[in-house]
């Protein structure tokens, strides 16, 4: 039958330090994940705004072209 290994005081302290370090790292990782999720949402919103802006610019270019063509037609007569 195998004997159960007894831990020395130093080994116990190292184990306690590692477990507290792992908890701290887990909290940091959760914080980083939340931050990344917020950034992803902001990037998606910015992408939507840019797409909307491109659409508006296209509409304004078409309207400006039509207005210039109409004014040019009136000036020819």
Image: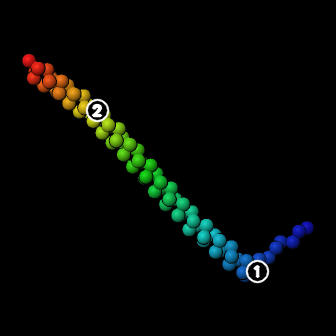
Q: Quadrant of residue 59?
A: top left
Q: Estimate how packed mark 1 is, as few (under 14), some (14 to 19) or many (20 or more) residues with alpha carbons within 10 Å.
A: few
Q: Quadrant of residue 76?
A: top left
Which mark's residue is nearer the viewer, 2 or 1? 2
Vertical arrangement, residue 56 with respect to residue 23, above or below:
above
- Front one among 62 and 56: 62
> Is residue 25 toward the left or the right of residue 46 in the image?
right
Q: Position of residue 71 (x, y in %)?
A: 13, 25
Q: Residue at x 46, y 51 (%)?
A: 37
State if disc 1 and disc 2 touch (CB < 8 Å).
Answer: no
Vertical arrangement, residue 10 with respect to residue 40, above or below:
below
Q: Of the numbered discs in the image, which one, if any, rests on residue 8? A: 1
Coloring basis for residues: rainbow
Q: Residue at x 63, y 69 (%)?
A: 19
Q: Count the marks: how many?
A: 2
Q: Residue at x 18, y 24 (%)?
A: 69
């Amino acid at each position: 039958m195998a004997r159960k290994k007894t831990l020395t005081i130093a080994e116990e302290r190292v184990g306690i330090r590692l477990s507290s370090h792992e908890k701290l790292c887990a909290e940091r990782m959760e914080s980083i994940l939340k931050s990344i999720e917020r950034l992803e949402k902001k990037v998606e919103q910015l992408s939507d705004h840019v797409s909307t802006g491109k659409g508006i610019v296209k509409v304004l270019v078409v309207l400006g072209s039509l207005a210039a063509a109409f004014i040019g037609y009136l000036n020819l007569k």
